[in-house]
Image (cartoon, rainbow, N blue to C red):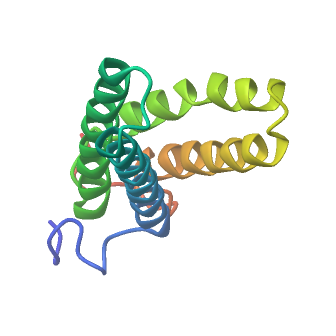
Amino acid sequence: MRSTAPGSPRTRSTSRTFAAALCLLQALALVGFAGFYLVELVAGGASDVGAVAMSLALFLVVAAGLAYLARRWWTGSGAVTTPTVVWNVLLVPVAVGLAQSGQLVLAAVLAVFVLLTIVAAVAAGRPGGGTGESDPEAP
């Protein structure tokens, strides 16, 4: 039996905190992109209003999902490793596309960010949350 609630500062591992922070940063980046698209939409700078509106909606939906994942990492709720890893694996082709289009710095930043998030998620998803301790509630 635990003496502190799951997700409290005494039981949250560094890996879980790092995974939460990285998911939250991704969510904030998507909200920033959505804000840019919204400005373009309102200012009339968009050549295809439908595509911009759908991209805006997609950014906001994914940002909400990432914010939810960040909260679950922070509170210590279970089953967040797989969706975090899957989302970041889906970003690998984006990094490759950026590199192929000559945006090497942006591609490198995204690739490092993806790698750090996957490593943090896998480390935090292990029993003991990456601390090397076994989970006392595990079967």
Residue at horizontal 41 percent and vertical 54 percent from the top? 32
Residue 118: image x %, image y %? 56, 42
Residue 85: image x %, image y %? 48, 34
Instruction: Say which of 112 and 82 sits in front.
Output: 112
* Residue 76 quadrant: bottom left
How many numbered circles does the render carry?
0
Q: Is residue 9 left or right of residue 29?
A: left
Residue at horizontal 55 percent and vertical 48 percent from the top? 117
Q: Is residue 68 left or right of residue 21?
A: left
Name the image quarter holding the N terminus.
bottom left
Q: Is residue 90 left or right of residue 57?
A: right
Name the image quarter holding the C terminus.
top left
Q: Is residue 131 left or right of residue 134?
A: right
- Most distant residue in the front direction: 44
Residue at horizontal 71 percent and vertical 48 percent from the top? 112
Residue 100: image x %, image y %? 82, 24
Residue at horizontal 40 percent and vertical 49 percent from the top? 127
Residue 24 versus residue 43 in the image, above or below: below
Residue 33: image x %, image y %? 43, 47
